[in-house]
């Protein structure tokens, strides 16, 4: 017999290294000789979209489009240390460092423009479309390219950002160990085959706190990825450790979800800007995962009335639990 | 008005990846390149002696690296408890023992077969709770318990006494793999006074530091290049072949490449900590959570990696996103002879929801409350404090998230939230 059930899961995730450890990102913004903006930062693109999101932050700060950003992140030789691509920290931490470096570069450009345009103050100056000009007299403007040509030494600024956390008290664990916290809620509908023990997730929905969406499409990609990883965690993945040996050490036996196992996940992006985030953004790489697996477990209970306290809920485990219930 | 933020820009690295132009470490080739292959432990806990004589005599074998070749034979993100190559003892299956450098991959494989390892097996421990017993086999010189995180708020005992509903359960999660698409691979070569290591990593600057410490080389003599990365999820935080390749290139003076098979990849990188989580959660008659007590035991396998940080994150997140005035959490992490666990998406905060979210549904049922209504009564709102006393002063849109999910579920799912067959 097939039985259906629904379930919900809520989660939160504190960003960063945490516990007062210096969680530092460094970034450099430079005016390139062609008038484009060079961003130099040791932040890895692991597939999460860091290259795109961090360029959007730089472009926003400089008033240009991402085509005018040159982004370098692949070598220790020409990039400052931006910390690890982990702990959902790159958008938040490194995004902030890039924003600060760009703001410093922008100020540098303004001071050069004051000199070149014979202005008397930085007040009322705009930096936009790769030009610097007095807002009330836009016909006199200097382009980034012309500034670059006139430079005798490179115009480059390095800035850093350190997340604000405290070390927790030893005996009580009291303190402010992480910041910011990101919230996530999943709902799912499952269908359980009581004869085979097979669980199919029919529908899923995620409402994801993002602070501010830098790139909604990449956020949706993170939600799909987080859900599929949680689906494998809840129902499939098992190394089958036997006396320390991984028995399932290839994808013919270590089963992970495929596209055929994935329901369409309805994504609801919830914006509530984080004041310390770059343009209000929070990291989502891990938050998108935490609440999904328990939603599936709660839906299984709702469908067939058995509480699965051990994961993964493989068909044999579920059949055993169903038999015990009888 | 924001112009670039909020735009659905196509990922900038996308076109190169979908057209096959992106270079992953496995795609790199150099003239005169040699191939490296790692010999790994087949036993979970044993003293070893290594004899490479016969393998070294094989035609095409250039050199076989062992612990004797490494200036400082250790590495690790928190403690330096990994050996670059095991010297006297192996602590888990898959521990690297030697690295053969040969003119072809085939010869390197053949040489691996000819290295003789004399294993003198030691009793092993494969269960985290057993590993905490005083008579359990010791994985390292110190005891197996690495860290105990304590969270204390209010008084759980008196709160349990006045509870209208209590749920008490033990939950277990499994050890899982990141299953990233691209197995580890890398190429190292000399360039002037520098050794260049091309490898897919989450943190090139830290890899450089690990290589620097193990090889006793100043940082400016090492360059780490991070080409396209085929997924990571935490599995590329601890290094794998970085030091092996750098050392090989330095000692031989020629480019050296290594590519792991999927099976070797499973053996080489960290895993998600399995946890045993015993929870007691209580609510009053109005449906407000009043107390939670949890004991969490994590298995970090043979090496610490991020054990302390992971079990601390599990402890801090153990309540779930709910206001609970009385909380007592003890989270422990221990060594065993299992494959080592480290960072994986969620980092301790992925395991605890398996427990706290089922506890929430169990309590809701006992209180005859709708699970959503029960969560809305207890979830964090701006101005609330977490169990560590941290003030959530803004950007806490959890009620909105729950409402939106609930609304969508009501419109789009057929099953009835409360009904149990």
Image (tube, rainbow, N blue to C red):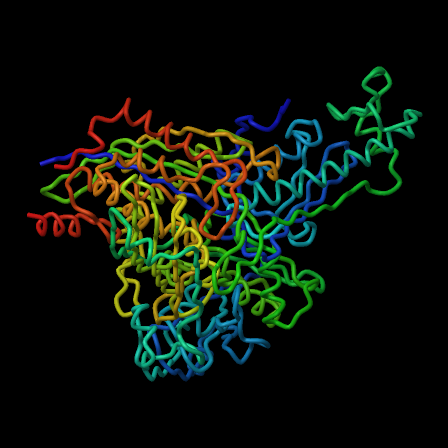
**Nearer-the-camera pick, A191 or B194:** A191
Left or right, A79 with respect to A224, comes to: right
**Residue at point 68% right, 60% down?**
B191
**Nearer-the-camera pick, B388 or A218:** B388
**Residue at point 21% right, 43% down?**
B366
Q: Quadrant of residue B399?
A: top left
**Nearer-the-camera pick, A125 or A37:** A125
Location of residue B200 in the rendering, given as x and y in whole percent from the top left corner? 52, 53
Q: Is A131 drawn above or below residue A222 in the view shown?
A: above
Location of residue A275 in the rendering, given as x and y in whole percent from the top left corner? 60, 36
Image quarter hosting the N terminus of chain B: top right
Left or right, B350 with respect to A81, comes to: left
Left or right, A131 with respect to B16, comes to: right
Q: Quadrant of residue B128?
A: bottom left
**Nearer-the-camera pick, B397 or B158:** B158
Location of residue B376 in the rendering, given as x and y in whole percent from the top left corner? 36, 35
Location of residue A241 in the rendering, given as x and y in whole percent from the top left corner? 28, 63
Image quarter hosting the C terminus of chain B: top left
**Residue at point 74% right, 46% down?**
A158
């Amino acid at each position: 017999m097939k039985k259906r059930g629904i379930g919900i899961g809520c989660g939160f995730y504190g960003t960063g290294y945490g516990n007062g450890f210096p969680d530092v990102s460094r970034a450099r913004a430079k005016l390139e000789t062609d008038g484009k903006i060079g961003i130099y930062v040791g932040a890895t693109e692991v597939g999460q979209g860091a290259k795109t999101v961090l360029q959007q932050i730089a472009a926003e700060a400089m008033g240009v489009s991402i085509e005018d950003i040159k982004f370098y992140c692949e070598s220790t030789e020409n990039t400052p240390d931006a910390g690890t691509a982990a702990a959902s920290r790159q958008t938040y931490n490194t995004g902030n460092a890039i924003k600060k470096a760009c703001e410093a570069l922008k100020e540098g450009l303004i001071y050069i423009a004051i000199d070149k345009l014979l202005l008397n103050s930085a007040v009322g100056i705009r930096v936009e479309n790769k030009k610097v000009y007095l807002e009330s007299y836009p016909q006199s403007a200097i382009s980034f390219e012309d500034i670059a040509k006139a430079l005798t030494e490179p115009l480059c600024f390095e800035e850093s950002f350190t997340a604000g956390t405290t070390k927790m008290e030893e005996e009580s664990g009291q303190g402010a160990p992480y910041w910011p916290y990101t919230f996530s809620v999943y709902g799912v509908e499952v269908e359980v085959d009581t004869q085979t023990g097979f669980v199919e997730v029919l529908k899923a929905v995620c409402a994801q706190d993002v602070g501010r969406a830098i790139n909604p499409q990449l956020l949706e990609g993170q939600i799909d990825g987080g859900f599929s990883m949680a689906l494998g965690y809840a129902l499939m993945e098992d190394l089958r450790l036997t006396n320390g040996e991984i028995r399932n050490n290839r994808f013919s036996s270590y089963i992970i979800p495929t596209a055929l196992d994935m329901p369409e996940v309805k994504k609801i992006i919830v914006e509530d800007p984080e004041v310390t985030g770059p343009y209000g953004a929070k990291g989502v790489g891990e938050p998108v995962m935490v609440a999904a697996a328990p939603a599936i477990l709660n839906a299984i209970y709702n469908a067939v009335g058995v509480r699965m306290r051990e994961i993964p809920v493989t068909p044999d485990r579920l059949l055993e639990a169903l038999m015990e219930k009888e | 008005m924001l112009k670039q933020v909020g735009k659905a820009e196509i990922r900038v690295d996308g076109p190169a990846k979908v057209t096959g132009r992106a270079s992953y470490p496995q795609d790199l080739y150099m003239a005169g390149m040699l191939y490296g292959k790692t010999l790994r432990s087949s036993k979970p806990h044993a003293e070893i002696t290594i004899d490479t004589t016969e393998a070294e005599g094989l035609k095409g074998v250039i050199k076989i690296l062992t612990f004797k070749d490494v200036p400082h034979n250790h590495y690790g993100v928190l403690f330096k408890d990994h050996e670059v190559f095991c010297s006297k003892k192996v602590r888990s299956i898959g521990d690297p023992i030697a690295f053969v450098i040969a003119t072809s991959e085939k010869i390197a494989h053949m040489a691996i077969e000819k290295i003789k390892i004399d294993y003198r097996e030691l009793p092993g421990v494969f269960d985290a709770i057993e590993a905490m017993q005083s008579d359990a086999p010791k994985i390292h010189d110190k005891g197996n318990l690495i860290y105990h995180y304590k969270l204390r708020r209010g008084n759980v005992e008196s709160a349990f006494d006045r509870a209208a509903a209590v749920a008490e359960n033990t939950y277990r999660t499994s050890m899982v793999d990141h299953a990233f698409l691209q197995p580890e691979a890398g190429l190292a070569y000399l360039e002037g006074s520098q050794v260049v290591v091309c490898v897919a990593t989450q943190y090139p600057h830290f890899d450089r530091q690990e290589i620097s410490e193990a090889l006793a080389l100043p940082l400016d003599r090492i360059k780490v290049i991070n080409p396209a990365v085929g997924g990571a999820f935490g599995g590329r935080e601890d290094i794998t072949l970085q030091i092996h390749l750098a050392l090989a290139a330095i000692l031989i003076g020629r480019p050296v490449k290594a590519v792991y098979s999927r099976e070797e990849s499973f053996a080489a990188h960290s895993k998600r900590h399995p946890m045993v989580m015993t929870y007691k959660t209580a609510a009053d008659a109005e449906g407000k959570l009043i107390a939670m007590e949890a004991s969490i035991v994590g298995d970090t396998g043979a090496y610490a990696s991020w054990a302390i940080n992971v079990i601390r994150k599990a402890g801090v997140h153990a309540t779930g996103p709910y206001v609970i005035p009385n909380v007592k959490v003890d989270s422990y992490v221990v060594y065993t002879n299992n494959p080592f666990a480290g960072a994986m998406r969620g980092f301790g905060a992925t395991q605890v929801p398996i427990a706290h979210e089922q506890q929430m549904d169990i309590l809701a049922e006992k209180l005859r409350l709708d699970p959503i209504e029960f969560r809305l009564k207890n979830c964090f709102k701006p101005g609330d404090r977490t169990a560590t006393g941290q003030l959530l002063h803004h950007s806490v849109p959890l009620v909105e998230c729950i409402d939106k999910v609930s609304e969508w579920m009501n419109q789009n799912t057929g099953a009835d939230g409360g009904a149990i067959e």
